[in-house]
Image (tube, rainbow, N blue to C red):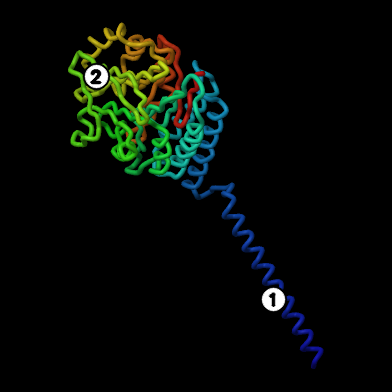
Amino acid sequence: MPGNIINNFNAMKKLICTLLVSACLMQMAAEEKAQTPPARFWGNQNAYLQRQANVMFDMVDQTLDRNPPQKGVPETRKLALANLDMLLHDTINDNSAALPGFLDKRVRKMTDSMGKPVTSGYELYKIYNDGFVARTPSVSIAFDIVRGMCRDKHLISDSLIGAVTDKCDILFITHNHSDHGDPGVVEMFLQAGKPVIAVPEFMPDDKRIRHIRPADGSSYKGKAELPGGKKLDLLIYPGHQDDLMNNLYVVTTPEGRTFAHVGDQYQSKSEDMEWIPGITPELPPVDALIFNCWNTRLPQIISTFRPTVAVPGHENEMGHTIDHREAFWLTFQKMEKSPADYVVMGWGECLKQP
């Protein structure tokens, strides 16, 4: 009898040990499955497309890092940006985690770079859409910075766009469209005691904003004072996007670097183009001209400002319908006729000019 009890006890111990080992193995397998995305997607189309988007966004991100912005049309960058077009023109990605994840990664790396001082020349950062930051050793100038919207959700978080605004001294807003002027971003500048200059149609009742609009056919010549006493020289022209006010900004830094941003300058009847070419004699030498890539008069705009480098913006605004998410491949085609050297930039990229 005691022998049977001992045998039963040993058998029970083996059974318990076996069950414990099996449970541990099952737990480990479950954890591994949770950490490793499935390699087969039969019957799971959405997971397949989501995984594909993640892989492609990562490949674009890595390729752009290895091939930074430069003049001309390097084939590797051209292919990477064309692949980004394909991803951004597939509306299945509009509500995916892959899209904001990609933009977050790009902008986060950019803010890390902005934390380092500019020792010579200038740096030009493209945040998103037509939002740019020009940096010299003394100042950082922001144009049309927004958080971006897609399907009623912000693409860039408040904390991340705040990391960008923290490194800027002043904000210029070209016109009253939500993809160029973001009240949330404006408030970050104003709360920090930094100047904001805009057209009168943008947040017209906020007296903290410096609203400037020259009379049609004339220009505004003046200065903008920054925290710390530094000053920028300003030339502002009264352009339009159809009937909407659209300021053309020409901003010169204490080092003598000049950046021009023309927002969404466009008129179907082209009245502005009767006087815009005539401003050339009064312009200082323009280091970088930023313009909307869908402008139908690109050669004339570029010839007017005669920049050292022309930089198109406004590609793939995610708040637009597919037919107005301007593709990078289309920008490359248009820029073949550019009368100046040009650089096509993706989100979260930096053009360094020593």
Q: Quadrant of residue 145?
A: top left
How far across and down, in percent of the image, does residue 227 sit? 35, 31
Please say if the residues under marks 1 and 2 sit with CB atoms less than 8 Å apart: no
Q: Give the CA distance from mark 1 to mark 2.
A: 81 Å
Q: In terms of secondary structure, where does tag 2 sit?
A: strand
Residue at the location (28% across, 26% down)? 174
Q: Which residue is mark 2?
A: 239
How far across and down, in percent of the image, does residue 330 sit? 41, 21
Q: Which residue is mark 1?
A: 16
In the rendered view of the protein, which quadrant contains the N terminus? bottom right
Question: How many other residues sit within 10 Å of disc 2, few (<14), some (14-19) or many (≥20)?
Answer: many
How far across and down, in percent of the image, does residue 270 sit? 23, 14
Three-letter amino acid code at the position of disc 1: Ile
Q: Nearer the viewer, residue 115 or 345?
A: 115
Question: How many other residues sit within 10 Å of disc 1, few (<14), some (14-19) or many (≥20)?
Answer: few
Q: Tell me, yes or no, if residue 170 can be seen here.
A: yes
Q: Tell me, yes or no, if residue 323 can be seen here.
A: no
Residue at the location (36% across, 35% down)? 318
36 is higher (above) or lower (below) than 270: below
Q: Quadrant of residue 154?
A: top left
Q: Earlier in the sequence, mark 1 or mark 2?
A: 1
96 is higher (above) or lower (below) than 10: above
How far across and down, in percent of the image, does residue 121 sit? 48, 19
Q: Quadrant of residue 215?
A: top left
Q: Nearer the viewer, residue 347 or 208?
A: 208
